[in-house]
Image (cartoon, grey):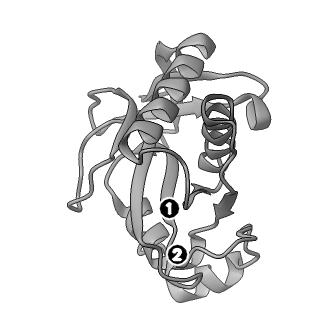
Amino acid sequence: MKMSKQIEKALVMTAEEMRRALIRIAHEICERNRGVQQLAFIGIHSRGDALARRIAANIAAIEELEPPVGAIDITLHRDDLDLFNRQALAGSRTSINFAIDGMRVILVDDVLYTGRTIRAALDALTHFGRPASVQLAALIDRGHRELPIAADYVGKNIPTSKRETVVVAIEEKDGRDAVTICEEADE
């Protein structure tokens, strides 16, 4: 039986490039929203939440006002898990300690791919209120959309094949910041 493993093909973002991209995204958010009043960040667990905190901290440095930041676990809203698996995985890591009604929510994810994660996040958000608007920030947009979803703010567009995987490593969870492209290799 053949086993497949991931091999790293290319480093596409260094820690410094990630830092600059997140600062640029913060500036774009401030400009588009004419400030940060009524703005809130919700990161998609498990790397989007850390990226959301970084963007909010960058905004605090720019605007001298840090918007609230939360995290959302989309497990129960995924369309690729059957009901049994959803119940087995329940143990939500959602943490939204502020009202989102009437807020301009910036949803943050590490990699935008098919759009299904974002659809699940939008479904999950409805349990917490009705924001005035939802905007999407993604560190990486790799294409291959299956749903009509586009990011408002993108750190970097990386064309990939469906055989490739984009791996975002972040200091808070992985001990380093980097974005790599990996590919399955048959052994």
- Please tell me which residue lies in front, 73 or 161: 73
- Residue 66 % position (x, y): 69, 45
Q: Is residue 82 visible?
A: yes
- Residue 122 % position (x, y): 44, 71
Judge from the rendering whether residue 142 lies leftward or rightward of residue 55; answer left or right.
left
- Residue 173 % position (x, y): 76, 38
Q: Secondary structure at mark 1?
A: strand
Q: Nearer the viewer, mark 1 or mark 2?
A: 1
Q: Is residue 32 above or below residue 71?
A: above
- Please tell me which residue lies in front, 25 or 175: 25
Specify the quadrant of the image occupied by residue 120. bottom left
Mark 1, residue position: 105
Specify the quadrant of the image occupied by residue 147. bottom left
How many neighbours does mark 1 have within 10 angstroms: few (below 14), some (14-19), or many (20 or more)?
many
Whether the residues at callouts 1 and 2 have beta carbons within 8 Å, the answer is yes
Mark 1–mark 2 distance (CA, rounded to whole Å): 10 Å
The image's mark for residue 169 is: none
Residue under the point 45% across and 78% down: 123
Q: Is residue 61 above or below residue 97?
A: above
How many neighbours does mark 2 have within 10 angstroms: few (below 14), some (14-19), or many (20 or more)?
many
Identity, as a three-letter code, of the amino acid under mark 1? Val
- Residue 179 % position (x, y): 53, 24
- Please tell me which residue lies in front, 167 or 17: 17
Residue under the point 54% across and 25% down: 23
Q: Secondary structure at mark 2?
A: helix
Q: Is residue 12 above or below residue 86?
A: above
Identity, as a three-letter code, of the amino acid under mark 2? Leu
Of marks 1 and 2, which one's residue comes earlier in the chain? 1
Residue under the point 26% across and 57% down: 149
Q: Is residue 16 above or below residue 38?
A: above
Residue under the point 79% across and 26% down: 175
The image's mark for residue 125 is: 2
